[in-house]
Amino acid sequence: MKKIDYDDSRIHYCGRMEKDPECEGYRWVFAASLALIRFQGSSLRAEISVKREGWDVFLGVIVDGIQSKLEVKEGRSEIVLAEGLDPDRIHEVLFFKRMDTMNIITIMSFQVDDDAVVFDANKSRSILASELGIRSGRRIEFFGDSVSCGEVSEAVLYTGKEDPAHNGEYSNSWYSYAWMTARKLHAEIHDTSQGGIALLDGIGWYHEPEQDGMESFFDKCQANKRLAPATDWDFSKWTPQIVVIALGQNDSHPIDFMKDDYSGSMAVKWRDRYAWFINQLLSHYSVAKIICTTTILNHDSSWDKAIDEVVKGIDNPQVTHFLYSKNGCGTPGHIRVSEADQMSDELASYIDYIMSVG
């Protein structure tokens, strides 16, 4: 096999990532982080290192349009991404992170057959490359929770129902409404989201009972401090035209203070901090359109009322509030593939509209 260095310029990468200080390679933390490789040969392998906090670890692979998942173990290993391919054809392999920051994947190298030819995936004109936003210049970033990550999205037999028992096998960022929206818009995606997260530190489910909120999470490249020291993200590396804030779902845990006491100190603090968060993003992305929303996952309407109040108070034409047709009442469980597809249709149409009106 012939080695391809992880930082070979012919590989197309997307997602917040950086060089791993512990081993030579690119470190993937966030869902939908990806590598696209284009080559003529019969097989492709990857050398990776895995850290995990919870759940089993599954990675996504699409080989010439056919998707599969790979279960990987902690530590270093060599995994097969594709084999038995027609050696005379040019193949495209998309390798991506299905799950959120509960695991960290470091890509150390790829290997192809000795006589394989590797092409520049950044110049690909394939249908997949178009959907991934390669060459389009379009970029969209999501700051959300498990729904934005595609958690439990593949449990299609539980559409419109509570989640089944699982250990991570149903989670797939490819089928999140977030990545579906990006593909329909032919845009690159950064999915800066985390299951269980709320806006504020100290509430929500993520890292309970010492919860990390998006307020201290959004500006990180390595964000899971239980797996490795946190690192800051350089916002100048990647600038989106559209930013979607999809928070307010986990914020009702352990107390639904927005529903119970809309004028209380905690609810006021949340609205103030939500406004702060919007302004933080505008300070990094000065010309981006900021879309504030929740999801169709069941929640009390007071959260959407609060978001609307904040958006109106900011009074900036770049900042808008969007509601889905089934907002807050679509399902008691996580959003499955068909539900995410409908959400992404609505959101993509809304983005097309706000971009057209300037």
Image (cartoon, rainbow, N blue to C red):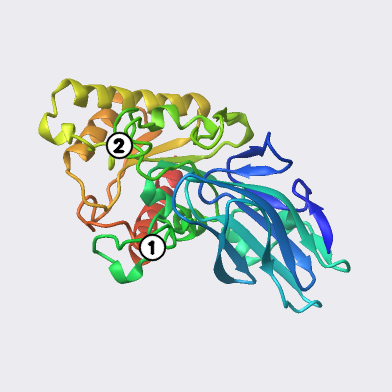
Label pair 1/2, CB-CB below 8 angstroms: no
Left or right, 122 with reference to 176: right
What residue would you read off at disc 1? 341
Residue 135 relative to residue 322: left or right: right
Q: Which residue is mark 2?
A: 204
Point out the residue furthest to the right here.
115
Rendering coords of residue 254 (x, y %): 22, 36
**Residue drawn at 63 percent across, 34 percent down:** 237
The first of marks 1 and 2 along the sequence is 2
Q: Is residue 233 left or right of residue 354?
A: right
- Looking at the rendered structure, the kind of residue marked 2 is Gly
Q: Residue at x 30, y 37 (%)?
A: 204
Q: Point out residue 104 in the picture as x, y percentages from the top left corner.
A: 56, 45
Name above or below for residue 137 compared with residue 229.
Answer: below
Q: What amino acid is labelled 1 in the image?
A: Asp
Q: Between marks 1 and 2, how big is the CA–CA gap?
A: 26 Å
In the image, 210 versus 358, the foreground residue is: 210
Figure quadrant of the N terminus: bottom right
Place of residue 112 in the rendered image (x, y in percent of width and height, measured from the top left): 79, 64
- Residue 108: tell me if it is visible: yes
Q: Is residue 336 above or below residue 133?
A: below
Q: Nearer the viewer, mark 1 or mark 2?
A: 2
**Residue shown at the point (42%, 48%) measured from the top left:** 351
